[in-house]
């Protein structure tokens, strides 16, 4: 049975309230195991509408589930996406407060900055590169408004693809003389190695991830505008966050980015 308009609105309101209160809610799929990707995006769109009405501004998008293990875990064969709001964008060296999140984790990623509009439905990695100013070292703080990360695909899609916040380096590296898929990355917490990765972890190529997003948004009438920041997907598994942690991701060509975690 499909969701009614009221069902969609009620679930969007539940997520909106969870974001406001900092109290996680039960998975939607616990009550409705039949919910899938389409229902998740319907709820996401209703939630985004509420947040835009509050004054939020979309400054880009994040792509999730770009690795095969994560897709297999949630029983899907494609990535997902959600908006990045300007209020959740931080700079290199940012201090992030645990109190602003419910159940945060952190991931190192490659971000793409667009210098020209990009649209599908026939976007290719080459077209994505042509539209790009360059690549940026980035980290994403993923967060779930669903209790204990008990998510199925509909739950995480509805919850803005489990987006929390991002931090970006100020350095933008033009894509020239190297392949983004071959970019290596070392991720440390308090100086100790916690993960390594390469650009190929993001759908085989970060530019392929951007092309996928443009093609997926095209049927919705959405063009990726110049100036957008696209988070292309985690290069490793999620890493837990604790107060006092200092995370540093160091990328070939792109350089480093560091964030510090505040809180009790």
Image (cartoon, rainbow, N blue to C red):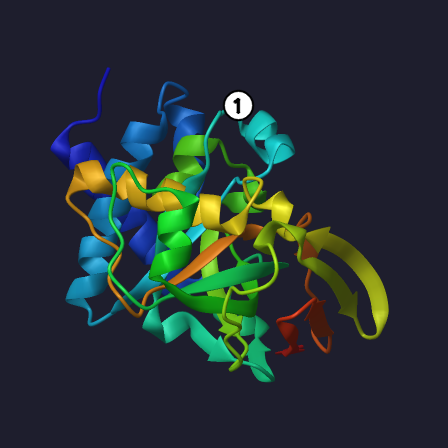
89 shown above or below 101 = below
Q: Nearer the viewer, residue 124 or 153?
A: 124
* Residue 237 % position (x, y): 68, 47
Residue at x 36% of width, y 74% of height = 87
Q: Quadrant of the N terminus?
A: top left
* Residue 233 % position (x, y): 53, 50
149 shown above or below 244 = above
Residue, far front: 177
Residue, far top: 1
Residue at x 56% of width, y 77% of height = 96
User: Quick one: label 1, few (<14), some, or many (20+) residues within 10 Å?
Assistant: few
Q: Nearer the viewer, residue 82 or 206?
A: 206
Residue at x 58% of width, y 44% of height = 148
Residue at x 58% of width, y 59% of height = 109
102 shown above or below 41 = below
Note whether residue 159 is visible: no
SS class of the residue under badge 1?
loop
Please indicate whether residue 2 sits to the left or right of residue 183 in the image.
left
241 shown above or below 33 = below
Q: Which residue is mark 1?
A: 75
Please indicate whether residue 234 sits to the left or right of residue 245 in the image.
left
Note whether residue 191 is visible: yes
């Amino acid at each position: 049975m499909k969701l009614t308009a009221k069902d969609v609105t009620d679930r969007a309101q539940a997520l909106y309230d969870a974001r406001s209160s900092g109290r996680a809610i039960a998975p939607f799929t616990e009550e409705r195991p039949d919910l899938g990707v389409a229902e998740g995006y319907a709820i996401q769109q209703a939630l985004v509408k509420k947040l835009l009405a509050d004054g939020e501004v979309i400054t880009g998008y994040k792509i999730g589930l770009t690795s095969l293990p994560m897709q297999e875990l949630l029983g899907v064969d494609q990535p997902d996406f959600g908006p990045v709001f300007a209020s959740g964008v931080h700079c290199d060296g940012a201090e992030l407060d645990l109190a602003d999140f419910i159940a945060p984790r952190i991931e190192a990623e490659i971000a793409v900055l667009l210098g020209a509009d990009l649209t599908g439905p026939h976007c290719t990695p080459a077209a994505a590169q042509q539209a790009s100013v360059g690549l940026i070292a980035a980290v994403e703080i993923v967060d779930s408004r669903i209790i204990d990360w008990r998510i199925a695909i509909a739950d995480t899609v509805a919850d803005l693809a489990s987006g929390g916040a991002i931090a970006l380096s100020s350095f933008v590296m033009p894509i020239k003389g190297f392949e983004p898929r071959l970019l290596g990355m070392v991720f440390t917490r308090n100086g100790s190695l916690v993960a390594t990765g390469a650009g190929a972890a993001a759908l085989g190529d970060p530019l392929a991830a951007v092309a996928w997003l443009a093609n997926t948004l095209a049927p919705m009438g959405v063009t990726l505008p110049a100036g957008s920041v696209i988070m292309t997907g985690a290069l490793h598994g999620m890493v837990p966050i604790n107060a006092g942690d200092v995370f540093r991701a160091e990328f070939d060509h792109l350089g480093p980015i560091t964030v510090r975690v505040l809180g009790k």
